[in-house]
Image (spheres, rainbow, N blue to C red):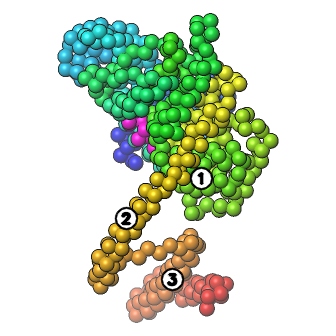
């Protein structure tokens, strides 16, 4: 940690000084990092007196791309953070000016190894959009196809990796020193975020995600995905087909669009990705969704995606059915099947909270229940009981909320639960399909045969390890803290007894030595025997008292 702080001293100071400026100086003090703070401004500005959540959002925006992305990811974790903070973090924006065209040109020519005018027939110097990681330009290929080219910001990777190293240090320090940080398992959340951000900076990952969604959508009558031009794409460049369309929240009936039909097509297209394919757009906000003249929904920006296994999708269907039927045990069973509920969780208390959640929705018609909010409420209950919610499920919760908001803005009468129910029924049928059950049974039989076949060899290996004394034994002590405290007390008393014995030996040595010399010394003039005797008696009485009080004699 010390090496990181020295290596990144300038950035450390920027971050810690910004924390002070926005009213989080107590956090820096509790982490013991006051020495890294530059002298903050004496006069507090208006930002200081805003709410904690708003100050945090402004702080993240000031600190730049890494922290903005961190806040955006945190806004999806309603299982960890409170609603007032989530609501504020959803407002995070990338207020980033575009970088110069000369840098764009240099990156393209370096990665594609040719002059820009030979690579593209035309290339707009002014970007159509700029964000914290990269910016987008319109262009035309030599073969005439219109495309958009996304270029990563120069030096952004170095900045992000520096910030990630500092954040890992600060969060690790917080978990060591602050109880609330340890309770939230912030380091685990951070590692998930760091991995996702590193993937997002690699445009090859986004290209692969786009191509996979494109293959899934070939026969989809609702959704369209742009083609990726691999020959014009690298780790820092992504070139895809240009989409002619209108942002989904900007469509109007007078322009020939049917908002109700668009809303239904959009929802069905996303549910097809989630419940049928298990690979879906992880950030379906209005800026990533366009409506074409033929009514098809065009999706872009697959930097964040969610993944759900077949088992996870079927358990999710059970969850929906449990919510729809308001059946607490079905909901609990679905949570267990998704590995959200671990062995250490008090399932009786969890069931009580789930029952309270069921009662909250009991009097509401099913058409008025928000699936996204219900899933978020479930995650909040899971977090209360220290259950670990997989990141893909939190992405799912965010995606469902985004879908519901967009759908309700287009057609307030259209209910998500009515659209999602057919997908749930299909998944339940698949779960109990005789062919699937037969396949599962066959796999179990094969696994059992393999286990029986390997058993003699494993037994011989175990016997050999025992014979050579190489068996590793792990002991789990439920009350390990209490045991450690008792060991500490015993060791302290032993040390105390040793000190007493040492003191007695030294006293005897001093007295004997002084008595054997004929020269008068300062020691002979002092009442050493009396002083030593009194100290020894007091220490002896203290040890006897401690032993009697402990009841271990």
Residue that mark 3 sits on: 494
Q: Is residue 255 visible?
A: yes
Main structural element of the magenta stretch: helix, strand or loop?
A: helix
Q: Which residues are magenta?
A: 192-201
Residue 409 on image: x %, y %: 65, 21
Q: Which of marks 1 and 3 precedes in the sequence?
A: 1
| Residue drawn at (58%, 8%) of the image | 256
What mark, if any, has residue 335 been given in the picture?
A: 1
| Residue drawn at (59%, 87%) of the image | 540
| Residue drawn at (77%, 44%) of the image | 362
Q: Is residue 195 magenta?
A: yes
What mark, if any, has residue 446 been given in the picture?
A: 2
Quote the CA–CA distance across marks 2 and 1: 28 Å
| Nearest the eye: 414 or 199 | 414
Q: Which of marks 3 and 2 precedes in the sequence?
A: 2
| Mark 2, other Cα within 10 Å: few <14 / some 14–19 / many ≥20 | few
């Amino acid at each position: 940690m010390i090496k990181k702080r020295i290596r990144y001293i300038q950035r450390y100071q920027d971050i810690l000084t910004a924390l002070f400026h926005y009213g989080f100086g107590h956090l820096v003090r509790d982490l013991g990092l006051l020495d890294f703070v530059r002298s903050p401004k004496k006069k507090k500005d208006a930002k200081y007196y805003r709410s904690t959540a708003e100050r945090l959002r402004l702080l993240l925006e000031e600190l730049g791309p890494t922290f903005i992305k961190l806040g955006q990811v945190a806004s999806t974790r309603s299982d960890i953070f409170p609603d007032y903070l989530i609501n504020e973090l959803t407002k995070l924006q990338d207020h980033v000016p575009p970088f110069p065209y000369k840098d764009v040109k240099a990156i393209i020519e370096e990665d594609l190894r040719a002059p820009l005018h030979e690579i593209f027939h035309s290339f707009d110097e002014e970007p159509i959009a700029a964000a914290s990681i990269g910016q987008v330009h319109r262009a035309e290929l030599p073969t005439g196809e219109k495309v958009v080219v996304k270029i990563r910001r120069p030096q952004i990777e170095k900045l992000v990796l520096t910030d990630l190293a500092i954040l890992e240090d600060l969060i690790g320090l917080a978990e060591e020193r602050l109880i609330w940080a340890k309770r939230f398992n912030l380091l685990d959340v951070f590692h998930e975020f760091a991995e996702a951000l590193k993937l997002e900076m690699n445009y090859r990952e986004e290209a692969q995600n786009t191509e996979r969604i494109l293959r899934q959508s070939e026969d989809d009558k609702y959704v369209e995905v742009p083609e990726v031009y691999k020959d014009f794409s690298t780790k820092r460049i992504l070139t895809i087909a240009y989409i002619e369309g209108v942002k989904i929240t900007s469509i109007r009936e007078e322009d020939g669009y049917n908002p109700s039909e668009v809303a239904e097509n959009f929802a069905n297209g996303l549910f097809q990705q989630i419940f049928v394919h298990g690979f879906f757009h992880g950030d379906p906000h209005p800026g990533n969704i366009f409506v074409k003249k033929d009514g098809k929904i065009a999706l872009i920006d697959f930097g964040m995606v969610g993944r759900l296994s077949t088992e996870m999708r079927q358990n999710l269907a059970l969850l929906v059915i449990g919510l729809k039927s308001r059946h607490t045990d079905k909901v609990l069973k679905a949570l267990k099947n998704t590995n959200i509920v671990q062995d250490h969780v008090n399932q009786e208390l969890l069931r009580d909270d789930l029952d309270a959640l069921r009662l909250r929705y009991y009097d509401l018609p099913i058409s008025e229940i928000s699936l996204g909010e219900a899933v978020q409420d479930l995650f909040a209950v899971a977090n209360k009981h220290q259950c670990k919610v997989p990141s893909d499920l939190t992405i799912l919760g965010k995606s469902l909320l985004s879908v519901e908001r967009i759908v309700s803005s287009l057609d307030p009468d259209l209910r998500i639960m009515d659209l999602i129910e057919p997908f749930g029924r299909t998944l339940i049928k698949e779960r109990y399909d005789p062919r699937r059950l037969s396949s599962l049974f066959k796999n179990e039989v094969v696994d059992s045969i393999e286990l029986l076949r390997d058993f003699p060899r494993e037994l011989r290996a175990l016997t050999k390890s025992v014979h050579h004394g190489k068996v590793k034994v792990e002991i789990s002590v439920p009350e390990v803290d209490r045991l450690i405290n008792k060991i500490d007390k015993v060791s302290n008393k032993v040390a105390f007894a040793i000190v007493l014995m040492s003191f007695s030996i030294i006293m005897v040595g001093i007295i004997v030595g002084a008595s054997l010399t004929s020269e008068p010394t300062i020691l002979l003039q002092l009442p050493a025997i009396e002083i030593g005797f009194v100290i020894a008696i007091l220490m002896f009485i203290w040890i006897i008292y401690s032993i009697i009080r402990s009841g271990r004699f």
